[in-house]
Image: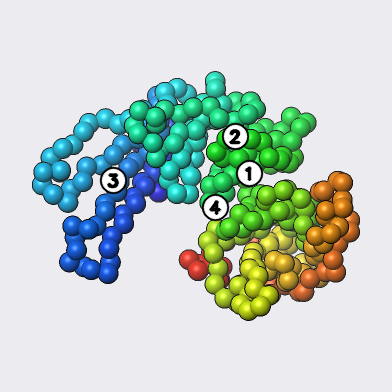
Amino acid sequence: IISFKSPETPTKRLIFISSEIQSNMSNKNASTNTDHQPIRLLARSKQAVELYTLPDTSSATEATKIKKGGTILHEGKTTLHVLSPNGQVVFIHDVSVGLLRSDLTENSANYKAQTFLKEDSKAVQLAKCSPRGSFLVTWERHSGVNNLKVWESNNGTLLTSFSCKKATLTGLQWTHDEKFAFHLVTNEIHMYDANTWKRVGKVRCQGVSSFSLPSVKGVAPNIIVGKDAAEKYLLTVFTPGTKGKPSRVDLLRYPDRMGRESSTVSADASAASTGGNNNDAVNPPSGPALTSKSLFNAEEAQVQWSPRADSAL
């Protein structure tokens, strides 16, 4: 992914490079069996969003077949575009239409972006995809109703919504497998089953301002091996300092090491509850945090996970 600002115009232009190369590594000499998918660039300007396919330079014949210009996905005044994690779908926002969806796996004739959301999305200002691209979350300016919305990325169905006055999407994150969604509220982080959007737990952190989940699958000891095999999810929680107390970062693990003030909703209680998100019947608190680190003179924290999702910087 390359992001840059053109010196000729103050308008930021984003170019995404999507390359899918499949090769037969078991036989280094079997070059004829290697399937090279084309490298494609997605560019957004003031006038349009275009898709460019780079020529295959592996042979002299193909290298000479350079086609000028790109395939126009959408023409109009756009404010943002979001590429799905696998690079097969792009979401484009047009202020006069709303969010549009373009499937890049179809033939070039079908690349044209089309409306797909079931509700009006002209006011959307921010958008991002879940780790596997099954969900799309959008934010629009708060106007007294829930403005942080979660959509089904294929058919545009609105699944749930929350209230979020701050212009950010980091307050809602998914686990790498999209089984659970974590939502930051005042002094707490709520955990939801991403299929039903029933709340399955919460962790209370006084003053918490941000958290981070890795977008890739972790390795042991995050995965329990054996008869009662179950996957666990690491996350970090940042709490800014107050007068007389330094800032703090906690490394937690859902669901068994979420801190002393955490709780998980039992399956039976969740099924019997009519309110779903306001369920008070919970299991006993889980164990303490895996580790904590005090930070002095820190107002915010940015977290970078390792490729194996077993450590955080």
Q: Nearer the viewer, mark 4 or mark 1?
A: 4
Residue contact between numbered discs 4 and 1, judged by CB atoms under 8 Å:
no
- Residue 174 placed where, x, y %? 62, 54
Is the residue marked by circle 1 packed among few (<14), some (14-19), or many (20+) residues within 10 Å? some
Q: CA distance from mark 1 to mark 2?
A: 21 Å
Quarter containing the C terminus: bottom right
Disc 3 residue type (three-letter)? Pro
Secondary structure found at label 3: loop
Vertical relation: 33 (above or below) 74: below
Task: Please report whichever mark, 4 or 3, sits nearer to the chain's N-terminal start.
Answer: 3
Secondary structure found at label 2: loop
Marking on residue 168: 1
Is the residue marked by circle 2 packed among few (<14), some (14-19), or many (20+) residues within 10 Å? some
Disc 1 residue type (three-letter)? Thr
Marking on residue 156: 2
Disc 4 residue type (three-letter)? Pro
Marking on residue 131: 4
Q: Nearer the viewer, mark 3 or mark 1?
A: 3
Task: Please report whichever mark, 3 or 1, sits nearer to the chain's N-terminal start.
Answer: 3
Secondary structure found at label 1: loop
Residue furthest to the right in view is: 280
Residue contact between numbered discs 2 and 3, judged by CB atoms under 8 Å:
no
Task: Please report whichever mark, 4 or 1, sits nearer to the chain's N-terminal start.
Answer: 4
Which quarter of the figure has residue 7? top left
Is the residue marked by circle 4 packed among few (<14), some (14-19), or many (20+) residues within 10 Å? many
Is the residue marked by circle 3 packed among few (<14), some (14-19), or many (20+) residues within 10 Å? some
Vertical relation: 148 (above or below) 302: above
Q: Which residue is mark 3?
A: 38
The residue lying toward the viewer, choosing from 52 and 8, is 52
Vertical relation: 248 (above or below) 100: below
